Amino acid sequence: MTDITAYLAAAVFVGFAVYRLSTAGAGETQRYICAFALCIGSALVLNAPTSIAALSRLMDARTLLVALVHGLKMGAFTCLALIALTLRNSTDDRTPVHRHVGAGIGVQALSGWLFAASAVTVTSDAVSVGDGRRLLFAGYELLFACYGIGCLTMLIGALAGHIRREAAGAVRAGLVLMALSAAVGVLWTAWSAHDMAAVLRTGRQGLGEDLPSTCFGVVIALLAACGSTANRWPALLGPLRWWRARRSYRALEPLWSALCTEVPEIALYGDGTRGRTRPRQATFALYRRVIEIRDAHLALRPYFDPGRPDPAAAGHPAREAAREAAAITAALANRRSGRRPGAGGPGSEPVRPWPVAGTLAAETDWLLQVTHAFVHHEDATR
């Protein structure tokens, strides 16, 4: 299970890097993002138990492998600090970037010295520390945790500034997900405290990533990938919109068919496609169907019976929909009999379409209610 989650997280990180490089170009921030994803993805692959076992059979260099994985993770943290700097600074001043690159190199050098001074021995399942070197190796782990949490905190702060300035929408949601990814990264880095405790207590720690650590990696990778693709979500929801439009198109069929049968001139089609539509054309077809129903309502206006206001229905969409459906049913019957009702008595008023917001979604929702009431009214009068 640990192998599966480690490789899954690595695959997401590497795929994320390739996606960012292919869609966002080679800007400075994008280069740091890709470098981060490649560093952390490579570290997860190399530190998976199966990878360690396979590489150990090829070469007896477990100690070097442990140091390399640690260095890749530290390099990933440096990339996060550089990402935060590019998000904060809009000037060409390179001093902060150079300073943090220098700090990253210094931390790597100090980390390497602590690792070497700890007289580490790596076996097939554990990392053991030389006699009297436990504090040195705990310092090695503490340096990793403090540097990582510091870099992640920098990134969260930079993202928070953009989140506050960004209007609600897909971009803001993406930034929030990226900040959540960094917050989970803080937890992931802090998880190394259990390695420090094990070293101080027993002088050894487990080799490779454990299951909680790889689970953190999967969550971070998924949040980062979702956040970076947030501006693509509307396009990904295209099939869902087509499906909903097609379903609404078909749900309006009973009302539209009754109107079109009696008032065939409302139909806008001229290619024999009545009742059929391709999935990608569903939204346009639905828009056309809504127009045809409203055109039919206008054509039937001379046949509507004047009605009296219904105080109980005022402000109640379901009752208003039932009232409009009943009026349409009566108007169709009047047209078939050739009857054109005259003006009603005192206080009467013609039945008008229920006013809705001028959007396709609002109009469709209303006509779906009218269609539902129309079908029930037709069934009740049979």
Image (cartoon, rainbow, N blue to C red):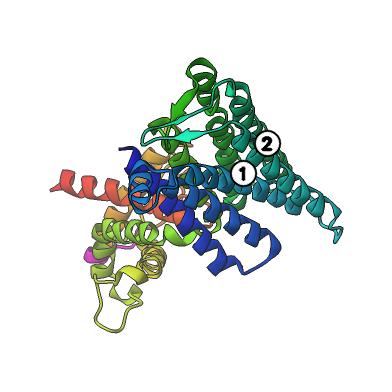
Query: Is residue 141 shown above or below 100?
Result: above
Label 2 sits on residue: 147
Q: 125 or 85: which is nearer to us?
A: 125
Residue 94 is left or right of residue 4, and the answer is: right
Q: Position of residue 177 (x, y in %)?
A: 56, 43
How packed mark 2 is, by other alpha carbons closer than 10 Å (few <14, some 14-19, many 20 or more), is some
Query: Is residue 121 shown above or below 46?
Result: above
Q: Position of residue 63 (x, y in %)?
A: 49, 42
Image quarter for residue 337?
bottom left
What amino acid is labelled 2 in the image? Tyr
Circles 2 and 1: CB atoms closer than 8 Å = yes
**Magenta highlight on residue 236:** no
Residue 244 is left or right of residue 61, and the answer is: left
Q: Position of residue 204 (x, y in %)?
A: 47, 25
Q: Secondary structure at mark 2?
A: helix
The numbered mark at residue 74 is 1
Mark closer to the chain start, 2 or 1: 1
Q: Position of residue 25 (x, y in %)?
A: 61, 69
How packed mark 1 is, by other alpha carbons closer than 10 Å (few <14, some 14-19, many 20 or more), is many
What amino acid is labelled 1 in the image? Met
Residue at the left extreme?
Answer: 382
Query: Is residue 340 shown above or below 105?
Result: below
Which residue is drawn at the image coordinates 70% and 62% (left, top)? Answer: 28
Magenta range is: 335-341
Which residue is drawn at the image coordinates 50% and 63% (left, top)? Answer: 18
